[in-house]
């Protein structure tokens, strides 16, 4: 059941992307290359599932949910640049800057980010105050007090030994901020109560840390072909990670704790939210 619904969500998202008005110039090709080139679509999937969990319809929030993937993709393009993580591969293919050059990769990221807000501001069949609230929250999550701040802290941490609290702070911002706003976007646009939105926030907070812990584990245990990007890149860049601080066994224990916290956050829902429960398990069990 989970796989069927996941594939249905991803199918809707991919069809939406295919139907965007891509131009045939290099800029459009570069943006499309990274956006259409695979990916788990966790953020828009989470937004769609959250909307349905509070009684909304996935179709009503689809453009806004897809905007989250544009923001995520822009961040990946920029992350891979030589000035950032300096990775040559992403999602099993050459990174954007290896195909189109650094300048056009930067501009492709800029284009995806700004187009995301065009989608978020486009008419949706929801009250305008909900849409305005979401616009502000997404901007905050993606900006200098959210994801961007996390990326800065991550760059500054290279070659340093961090505490568990410092590692969690980086990941709450770099990875967690956009996952949290994905759940909140779905809850807000779907018409959820404030109690439901708070529960979705707690769920996504734990989900975000679980996601990053699993990434740290896969960086050690996975192989480049399965991951679709270089394995052990954190080790080469001397980054502090959950396994480097807690050991591999300790990191796996923390992963289990965060997944359990995500499950517990959903206890306030009166109707079944099986997909969200399964999504937490899926993130913990994934191979890439």
Image (cartoon, rainbow, N blue to C red):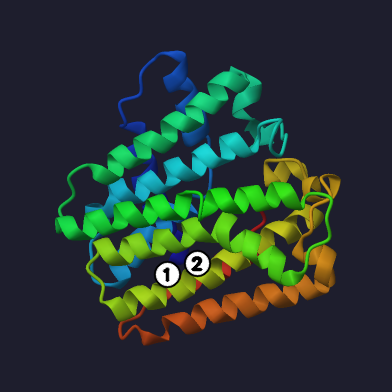
Query: Considering depth in this image, is 99 or 277 the residue closer to the camera?
Result: 99
Helix, strand or loop at mark 2: helix
Q: Position of residue 188 (x, y in %)?
A: 28, 65
**Residue 35 visible to the viewer:** yes
Frontmost residue, 286 versus 85: 85
Distance from the alpha carbon under mark 2 to that under mark 1: 6 Å
Report crowding for label 1: few under 14, some 14 to 19, many 20 or more residues within 10 A (C-alpha). Answer: some
Tell me the number on the disc at residue 249. none
x%, y% of residue 231?
78, 46
- Image height of 99 relative to 134, above or below: above
Q: How many numbered marks, from 0 up?
A: 2
Question: Above or below — where is 9 with respect to 258?
Answer: above
- State yes or no: discs 2 and 1 in contact (Cβ < 8 Å): yes
Q: Quadrant of residue 185?
A: bottom left
Does 230 sit above or below residue 24?
A: below
* Residue highlighted by disc 1: 275
Q: Residue at x 53, y 52 (%)?
A: 147
Where residue 257 sits in the image (x, y, percent)?
64, 80
* SS assignment at label 1: helix
Instruction: Classify residue 185 as left or right of residue 123.
Output: right
Is any part of residue 283 visible from this angle? no
Q: Which mark is residue 279?
A: 2
Q: Nearer the viewer, residue 88 or 114?
A: 114
Q: Is residue 201 left or right of residue 136?
A: right
């Amino acid at each position: 059941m989970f796989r069927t619904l996941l594939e249905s969500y991803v199918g809707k998202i991919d069809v939406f992307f295919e139907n965007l008005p891509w131009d045939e110039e290099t800029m459009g090709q570069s943006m499309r290359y990274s956006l259409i080139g695979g990916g788990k679509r966790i953020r828009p999937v989470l937004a769609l599932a959250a909307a349905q969990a509070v009684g909304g319809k996935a179709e009503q929030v689809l453009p806004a949910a897809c905007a989250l993937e544009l923001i995520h993709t822009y961040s990946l393009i920029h992350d891979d640049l030589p000035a950032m993580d300096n990775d040559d591969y992403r999602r099993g293919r050459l990174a954007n800057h290896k195909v189109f050059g650094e300048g056009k990769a930067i501009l492709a990221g800029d284009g995806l980010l700004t187009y995301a807000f065009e989608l978020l501001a486009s008419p949706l069949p929801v009250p305008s105050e909900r849409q305005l609230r979401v616009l502000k929250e997404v901007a905050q999550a993606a900006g200098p007090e959210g994801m961007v701040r996390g990326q800065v802290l991550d760059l500054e941490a290279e070659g340093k030994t961090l505490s568990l609290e410092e590692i969690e702070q980086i990941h709450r911002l770099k990875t967690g901020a956009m996952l949290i706003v994905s759940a909140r976007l779905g809850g807000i646009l779907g018409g959820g109560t404030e109690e439901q939105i708070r529960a979705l926030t707690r769920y996504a907070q734990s989900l975000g840390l679980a996601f990053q812990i699993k990434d740290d584990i896969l960086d050690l245990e996975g192989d480049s072909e399965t991951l679709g990007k270089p394995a052990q890149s954190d080790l080469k860049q001397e980054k502090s990670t959950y396994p480097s601080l807690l050991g591999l066994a300790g990191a796996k224990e923390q992963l289990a704790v965060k997944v359990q916290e995500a499950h517990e956050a959903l206890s306030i829902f009166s109707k079944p939210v099986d997909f969200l429960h399964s999504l937490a398990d899926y993130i913990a069990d994934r191979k890439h």
